[in-house]
Amino acid sequence: MALSFEQCSSIIEEQLNNLVIGGRSPVGLYEPVDYVMSVGGKRVRPALVLMACNLFSDDVEKAITPAISFEILHNFTLLHDDLMDNADVRRNRPTVHKRWNNNTAILSGDAMMILAFQYMCRAQPDILPLLLDTFTHTALEVCEGQQYDMDFEQRNDVTLDEYMQMIRLKTAVLIAACLKTGAVCGGANNENIESLYRFGISLGLSFQIQDDWLDLYADSAVFGKSTGGDILSGKKTFLLLTALEKADKKTGRELIALLHDNTIAAEKKIDEVKSIYDRLEVGAAAQQTIAKHYQQAMSHLNDAVVFNKSRKIELEVFAEKLLKREK
């Protein structure tokens, strides 16, 4: 049976509801972990593990613990990202370091990483070495991506190519690894595993660039928060770096001056930067790049040979929804 993204997400949610974390001792270590894992979310990454497995097998049970492992890993990275960014809110709730304290966020995050390893180690013994290699390689790449992101905050010469490499490491490799893991669990051959990994990389790149675009161009009522946050924080995004690449010297200096001007009102700064982006057709460039990586993703997905094409269609539907999302 072909499982939809919603069905796979529901399976993961049920499994996560059965996790016994909050009741462990010491409470000060595990309560924040339970707090993070119970907040909900779309469960995109673990659902993709199950969907990839389902391409090649009716038995997705064998992919559940690796899927849970990746969901714990993902939420661990969010917890520590929030601490490094000193963020106040995550998914409409106070972040762990705000509700508890910095030391709790560090230690509970460390515990989450170890729990992620524990769940991965429950995978079938014959495929465990490959799954662990994929997991550890990906976890390290995500750390590399985060470091590049931090380094970019201190640099004014970041190139678009460097940015694409950063988001590949910080975002795309985790999506790709989830798909690869699911394919391995489903018994796929090496060619299919590689095709799905590449599908995940291209999909992850389009996903992150769409995030950058939505931050400025989304409908605020649908987006659920004010737009322009990346401009106010001076974050290096696809939009900013494309603008700097396309701008002449005068416009480039004007844009940099605007971003560093702390005397201007927030709304005015966003409007003026957006005006420059519009003149340079940055939004359109982002949409073209999103479409390019989406088409590449579809090509890689088509390369995967499965016995039931309806199962591939479920991934196509998911990818299209991801591309067309408004928040």
Image (cartoon, rainbow, N blue to C red):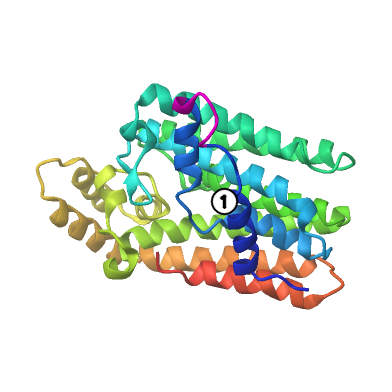
Q: Residue at x 71, y 46 (%)?
A: 65
Q: Residue at x 55, y 43 (%)?
A: 74
Indicate left or right for 134 with 59 as reference: left
Predominant secondary structure, magenta span: loop
Q: Residue at x 37, y 65 (%)?
A: 283
Residue 174: image location, x then y, percent:
62, 46
| Mark 1, secondary structure of its residue | helix
Region in magenta: 22-28
Indicate left or right for 190 with 209 as reference: right
State yes or no: residue 27 in magenta: yes
Residue 217: image location, x then y, percent:
32, 65
Answer above or below: position of 185 versus 222: above
Answer above or below: position of 195 versus 133: below
Number of residues whose C-alpha sits closer than 10 Å to that of mark 1, classed few (under 14), some (14–19) or many (20 or more): few
Instruction: Name the residue nearer the viewer: 17 or 111.
Output: 17
Where, by quadrant of the figure, is residue 159 drawn? top left
Answer above or below: position of 5 versus 115: below
Where, by quadrant of the figure, is residue 73 drawn? top right
| Residue farthest toward the bottom in the current orientation of the protein | 310
Q: Which residue is mark 1?
A: 17
Quarter of the rendering occupied by the N terminus: bottom right
Indicate left or right for 2 with 253 as reference: right
Instruction: Name the residue nearer the viewer: 64 or 277.
Output: 64
Is residue 136 at least partly visible in the picture? no
Instruction: Name the residue nearer the viewer: 3 or 130.
Output: 3
Amino acid, disc 1: Asn
Instruction: Name the residue nearer the viewer: 26 or 159.
Output: 26
